[in-house]
Image (cartoon, helix red, strand yellow):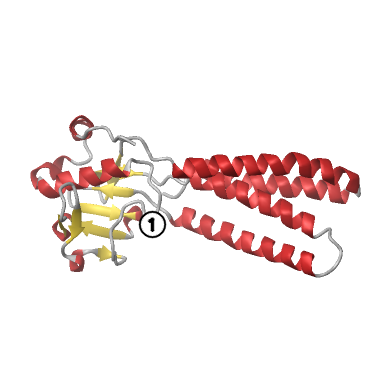
């Protein structure tokens, strides 16, 4: 499972709308309409970028809950990918760059139009890379046997994990037991954003590292309710 369909809309709609609006003005051959369009779109996109940046810096208030899923025929807790904040920021930033570049293409000469084409190329590559990441992303799943990262591209058996140097932390004590894609440093949420409080996720994993007798209950409603009740709310 990749990103949600609405995430793609949030990412692609702003640059598409800006490009369409500018193209309509240019095709209509009404250059006097470009300045009012610029005065309307530029403040809106800048304001949106600021809002998106603020959203990126906010912590997730927890404990956000897992969803119940089935993985390899067994019940599991799934922490789904969450790209919405990134898409808000990158979509509006992309729209601002498109607006700036299309404005630059109207300037006479070679330097400014060349820079405008370069901005469009870099912007397009960035959006494509993010789309590729969103499409290939997957949930992080906790099962009775271990942890599936990014939808199962890596699988870390519980036997591969050990307690960390501090309480509530853990580490990969036996990397040779990891299946699939190698995991050099297992940091949930580092490779993909997750729609769950990372504090809640780390504390949950620590609970199962310390108490293996609780692992068979993973994926059940009673166990999920127990986690919600035993893990204190994150203060952010």
**Residue at left 50%, top 48%?**
86
- Where is residue 78? Give x, y as percent: 31, 44
Q: Is residue 232 visible?
A: yes
> In the drawing, does residue 112 fall left or right of residue 50?
right
Helix, strand or loop at disc 1? loop
- Report how many numbered discs are placed on residues in the image: 1
- Where is residue 160? Give x, y as percent: 16, 60
Q: Residues within 10 Å of mark 1 (few under 14, many from 20)?
A: few
> Residue 223, relative to residue 192: is it above or below?
above
> Residue 111, relative to residue 65: is it above or below?
below
| Quadrant in the picture for residue 162 | bottom left
> In the drawing, does residue 19 fall left or right of residue 221?
right
- Tell me the residue that label 1 is attached to: 191
> Residue 232, relative to residue 93: is it above or below?
above
| Quadrant in the picture for residue 80 | top left
> In the drawing, does residue 189 fall left or right of residue 203?
right
**Residue at left 38%, top 46%?**
194
**Residue at left 77%, top 41%?**
39
Quadrant of image for the C terminus: top left
**Residue at left 30%, top 42%?**
69
- Where is residue 51? Give x, y as percent: 55, 39
> Residue 51, relative to residue 190: is it above or below?
above
Q: Is residue 84 visible?
A: no
- Where is residue 20? Give x, y as percent: 75, 47
């Amino acid at each position: 499972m990749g990103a949600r369909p609405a995430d793609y809309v949030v990412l692609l709609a702003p640059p598409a709308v800006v490009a369409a609006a500018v193209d309509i003005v240019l095709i209509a051959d009404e250059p006097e309409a470009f300045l009012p369009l610029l005065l309307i779109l530029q403040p809106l996109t800048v304001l949106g970028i600021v809002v998106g940046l603020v959203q990126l810096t906010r912590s997730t208030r927890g404990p956000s809950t897992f969803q119940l899923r089935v993985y390899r025929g067994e019940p599991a807790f799934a922490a789904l990918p969450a790209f919405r904040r990134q898409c808000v920021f990158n979509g509006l930033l992309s729209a601002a760059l498109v607006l700036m570049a299309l404005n630059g293409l109207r300037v006479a000469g070679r330097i400014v139009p060349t820079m405008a084409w370069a901005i469009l190329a870099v912007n397009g590559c960035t959006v494509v890379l993010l789309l590729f990441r969103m499409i290939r992303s997957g949930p992080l799943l906790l099962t009775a046997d271990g942890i599936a990262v990014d939808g199962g591209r890596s699988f870390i058996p519980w036997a591969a994990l050990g307690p960390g140097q501090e309480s509530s932390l853990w580490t990969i004590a036996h990397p040779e037991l990891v299946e699939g894609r190698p995991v050099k440093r297992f940091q949930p949420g580092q490779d993909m954003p997750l729609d769950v409080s990372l504090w809640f996720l780390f504390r949950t994993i620590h609970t199962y590292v310390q108490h293996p007798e609780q692992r068979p209950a993973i994926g059940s409603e009673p166990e999920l309710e127990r986690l919600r009740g035993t893990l204190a709310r994150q203060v952010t």
